[in-house]
Image (cartoon, rainbow, N blue to C red):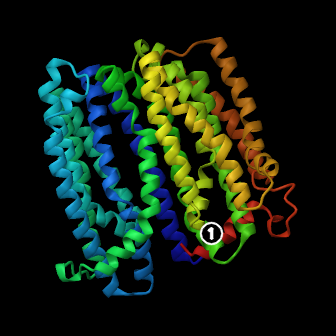
Amino acid sequence: MKKLDKIALFKNVGSSWFALGVNILVGIFISPYIIHHLGDDAFGLWFLVFSITGYYGLFDLGIRSSIVRYVATYSATQNQEELNRLISTALFTYSGIGALAILFTVAGSFFVDSIFHISPQFLHTARWLFLIVGSAVSLGFPLGVFGGVLEGLQRFYLLNFTSIGATVLRAVSIVIAVRHGYGLLVVALITVSMPLISGLVNATAVLSLLPLRLQLNNVSRESLRRIATYSSSTFIIIVAARLRFKTDAMVIGKFISAAAITYFVIGSRLVDYGGEVVSGLAQVFVPMSSKSDATGDLGGLRRILVAGNRACALIIFPIAAILIILGKSIIEAWVGARYVPISYPVLLVLVIPSTLMLAQSASGRVLFGMAKHKSLAIVTLMEGSANLFLSIFLVRHFGILGDAAGTAIPLACTTMLFLPRHLCRVLKLRIGIYLREAFLLPLMLCVPLVAVLLLMRHWFIAHNYIQLAIQLVAGSLVYGVGLLWAIWTRKAWQVEGIHDPDTANQLAVGLIETYQQEEI
């Protein structure tokens, strides 16, 4: 890679990891702060409304993915006219979507309290909360165009720096507001205003980087057709993702109460944090897979699949082990001991299928890169539908834990029965070899970690952050030594048992060569 390309890569990847770390740290601090100062009902209502408005993401229709794709294409070919048409068309389309979303918000604010079980003292707050959050999300649609443009221009570091500033400012503002006696509505107003401010900053950056002419006469039917064609399959994935992971709060709010959502969120959010770390790594596999597919490099696609999933497993397996063994202590130190009896079982039910999914994060990215994700879209849509129906059925009989099981069962079926076999069939790879090469080493490296954590827990149960840190440091050191040994001896990257000449090279070499060809 060229020196400038390496610098850009460092800025993009480094800022992404830093932004993720800031976001997780702020989330760890803010969630218990809101719970303890505003109460379970307020926090549950908060999460419920944000879950409902999260479905506004369906209005995206996959358009943002098209913006990223075609901005990259037109900027590389210096086709300024098509770039103007694309961004003008996307901005016009998103403005219409935002207007419809605002109308939906106004209408929905009158029925929130009649649909979900909300405490009488929060009825008025629920209407205004939905109105504030829904309106802000609606306004975010046209501003989101500029974030997509920055991604297409490979200026991820600008997005990340803006995100970091907004995240820190949000946390500080919430603490100040709560300490001065302000309630849930002010906290919500602070939360939703930060993305809008970030969007304005992104828009300013884009307009300074590109000589755009955002005019109505640049709105093109051909550009709209091109956007719709590319984004159709992505839209199915978006719908499936909402059904898979964003229905739990609404099901619990409908059949139990808003306060019960708090107990579910505490367990599920710890699993989500691990997922965010893996997702930050897995996003690089899409362009790598696209390049290998375009050149007909089947061996390269196999290397990306195996090495990518091995890297994801090396991250998520130790996180899962820590959550399972020390989960009770983590919850107690984080939000308090009274949440452990309910939130820890939720964590246990969700963590195993989620780990199986996250350990295969490269699989979906490879399919996206090959433009062969239609089967994945259909299966995940079926999974999401099964998730919703099972959660509704089981929550009535088993409460919060039943809802968690309704999510876990379909997810486990997809990750165990469909995803490995489908990828191996597409890439003509033996499933036994794939499973061994991708996951055996991460599992072996976790054995000493598990032993140390169990021994530490036998010696003493952690009840606060200091005691928990001692156990985490001990386990992390052991796992770190094993990981360094695997990297130093190249066992973390070597492939044994794949005798195809296209895939006989070391995975590290293959990945570096594939990534360098991208010239990112």
Please tell me whether mark 1 sits on a helix, a strand or a loop: helix
Please say whether residue 243 is visible from this viewpoint. yes
In the visual, does 67 lie left or right of 216? right
x and y percentages locating residue 468 in the rendered image: 53, 22
Where is mark 1, residue-wise? Answer: 515
x and y percentages locating residue 401 in the rendered image: 48, 21
**Numbered circles on residues, count:** 1
Q: Residue at x 28, y 64 (%)?
A: 202
Up/down of 431 relative to 256, above or below: below
**Which amino acid, by three-letter code, is at mark 1?**
Tyr
x and y percentages locating residue 115 in the rendered image: 24, 29
In the visual, does 242 lie left or right of 414? left
Q: Residue at x 67, y 67 (%)?
A: 512
| Quadrant that contains the N terminus | bottom right
Q: Quadrant of residue 215?
A: bottom left
Up/down of 501 relative to 103, above or below: below
In the image shown, does 84 or 520 lie closer to the viewer?
A: 84
